[in-house]
Structure formats: structure tokens, C-alpha cells
Amino acid sequence: MTDHAAEGGFCCADHSGTANAQAILAQAEGQARARGVRLTPVRKRTLEILLQAHGALGAYDVLQRLGAEGYGTQPPVAYRALNFLVEHGLAHRIRRLNAFTACAHPGEEHRAAFLICEGCDSVTEAPARGVSDALALAADAVGFHLERATIEAVGLCAGCKGARA
Amino acid sequence: MTDHAAEGGFCCADHSGTANAQAILAQAEGQARARGVRLTPVRKRTLEILLQAHGALGAYDVLQRLGAEGYGTQPPVAYRALNFLVEHGLAHRIRRLNAFTACAHPGEEHRAAFLICEGCDSVTEAPARGVSDALALAADAVGFHLERATIEAVGLCAGCKGARA
DNA sequence: ACATCTAATGTTATACCATAACAGTCAAGG
DNA sequence: CCTTGACTGTTATGGTATAACATTAGATGT
Ligand SMILES: [Zn+2]
Ligand SMILES: [Zn+2]
Ligand SMILES: [Zn+2]
Ligand SMILES: [Zn+2]
């Protein structure tokens, strides 16, 4: 994604920026302990990297940052940490972008939808109970047993919509 | 995807197999004429290939078939044809599978959801008005202007669900 | 028919995304 | 200790997608 920090500000109010990063990180620690899995240094650092990013980060972006900090420099290092975070609900994969983003509400049972802004590349995690329910209904209608779903919307965030002269 | 024809049958009733292929193809022809775009030989053949497939096909699968029939053998040949079809509503991209599938209802205004079966790799296009509306609502709630969305569900189709001993 | 312009096709080359397989390391638990 | 399983790291490879450019086929106006 584009480097918004370098552009001197955030265009979207509701992104998972540095604001609540500490809280989320603490939540993640507790959750890992509760589930009996280890939030090791690479994994934790990977989560921090995602939390600091404005939008979603590609695996190779994460890898570069990890490598620069003394961790491994090869793709599996990043993919393993990212997959761990996704598996344990601490991050999400955004398939449309081939990228990953920190979960904004770890712990809460939430089937999320992602709102991808074409103006500023931000990715917002929106609660999607209604969407999920509707999808379950549609699936049921054709006898399909739904396991999980990917819901990704593309458009313009509030900030970028307003910025259109 | 796996080659179901070789496995001797279809496991899912509602796939875009050879049954209605002719009708869809005719519909596509008319639609292209109406929109003033050209359904050239490669494009048409690509659509046919998608229609004949049981599930979704990767771009390189399509490319191989095209190449074997005298068309170009390099990736852009397939990607261009596939992107054309997607742009004009004649095919859909399934991001979770890095694959493409023919649209089952070209022409109709339909925001579709895709039901991906983990048992037989089939991809079913389901009408998703309700889902789409719910998503629009969720987006609206945070001031997000929705352009288009990807809705992909993973689970078991009716056939595979029943086949579970 | 002819010149001209544009869309479409084809090619080479390259970039980007993701995983398999194996070797070394580290922290419990016996 | 020493075994065991989880974790990290590496090399190597495979799969997905696009940029850039040359060529060709259709449409358009004269
Ligand atoms: Zn989340
Ligand atoms: Zn924006
Ligand atoms: Zn469709
Ligand atoms: Zn199935």
C-alpha cells in the first residue's frame, strides 16, 4: 500500500492506527494466554507492524520490516507469523489486496466486512452481522452449508468522499 | 481446479455446466452487440471454456486451452480475455481461488455471492440481493460509499454435505 | 480502393505472491 | 540430562499477474 505517514496525515478517521494499538496488543496477549498459544516475539512484532500501518500490508512489506529488525528475511517468516495471527483472530487477510490487516476487535465474535477505500487505500473493518446473516440465509436456500465467508467492499471512505471537490 | 469430468460425474446440480451453455453464449453475443463491444474469437472461446468447466478455472488453465487451439500462449492473452469478460459481466473473478468462472445469469442485474464447495471445488453463483443490501447498509452507517463488493462463502454444497457418511 | 486511426492480439521480460522441504534452535516435561 | 514438540530460519521452487512493445485486423472518412 501507499505510505500515508509520509504523506503527512491520515485521511480516514476509523482506521486501526496507533491510537488503540496498545489496547489491542494487550488484548491479544491475554487472548493468546487464554488459548494456550504463544505470542512469540516475531508474531507480536508482526501484529505491531500491522497495527501501525494505515491500511493493509502485503506479506513482503511485513517481511521487509521484520528483516530490518533482525528477524528472518525469507517469505515463510512473514507468512507463518501472519497465518498464525489470522488463525487466532488477531488479523485478517484481505484477498482483494493480497494483504493483511490487524483485527480491530480481537476477541469479540465478529464476522467482519472490509471496506476498502480506493482513494486512500485504507481498510476499515466493519461489523457485518446483518450481512453474514443474509448470506447464511442465501446459502441455506440452496442447501449450502456455510463455513466462513469473505466480504470485501470497494469504494470511497467518508474522508475521501468528502475530499472530492 | 480438479478435473471432475475425469472423475466421472458432477456432484453439484446447480453448476454452470454444458446444459445452458448455448443459451448463455447467445445471450452474451447479444449483450456484446448491444453494448457496442466485440466478442472476438479469443474472448468467445474463453467464455466457452469457462462455461464448459465444472468449477472455476485459473488464468493459466484457460491459457493452456487457448494455446492448444492456436491462440497466443502467453499470460496476457488469457488475462486480457478474462478481464474483458469480467468487465462486461460475462464472467466473475473468484479471488479466494485465484480463478474465474462464467457468469450464470448474464444481463440480469445481479450482485452475486459465490458459494465455494470445499468438497468438490464447485463454485455456485447465488443471487445476493439481501446480502448486498445489508452490506450497503453497513457501509452507509460509517459513511462509506460502496462501489462494488466481493462476497465469497466457503463450505459444503448440498451434494457433498449429503455424501458425508 | 486507399489512407488512416484505433482496438485487439501476440511476444518478451519481469514483478509479485505463496509454499514445500529441510536444518537448526529452544523451551518444557520426564 | 535428554527427549519431544513447537518455533524459527534457510534454500529452492511454483503459481499469479502485469508492463512494455511490435504487429495485425477492423472500422472510418475520403
Ligand atoms: Zn476482526
Ligand atoms: Zn479514503
Ligand atoms: Zn453473474
Ligand atoms: Zn460439492
Image (spheres, coloured by chain):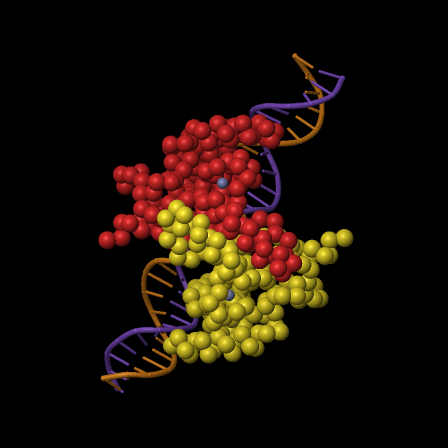
Chain colours: A yellow, B red, C orange, D purple
Q: Which residue is at 59% across, 28% downward?
A: B34
Instruction: Work out whether residue A159 or residue D9 is closer to the camera in this orientation and state it.
Output: A159
Instruction: Work out whether residue A70 or residue B130 is closer to the camera in this orientation and state it.
Output: B130
Q: Residue A74: in sight, yes or no?
A: no
Q: Which residue is at 35% across, 51% downward?
A: B156
Q: Which residue is at 53% across, 35% downward?
A: B107
Give the x, y percent position of residue C10: 51, 33
Q: How many marks?
A: 0
Q: Is residue A29 above or below residue A92?
A: below
Q: Which image quadrant: the N terminus of chain B?
A: top left
Q: Is residue A104 above or below residue B145?
A: below
Instruction: Work out whether residue A7 or residue B115 is closer to the camera in this orientation and state it.
Output: B115
Q: Residue B107: in sight, yes or no?
A: yes
D20 sits to left or right of B13 = right
Give the x, y percent position of residue B95: 48, 50
Give the x, y percent position of residue D14: 39, 51
Q: Quadrant of residue D27?
A: top right
Q: Which residue is at 51% across, 78% downward?
A: A26
Q: Is residue A19 above or below residue B92?
A: below
Give the x, y percent position of residue A81: 45, 68
B99 sits to left or right of B132 = left
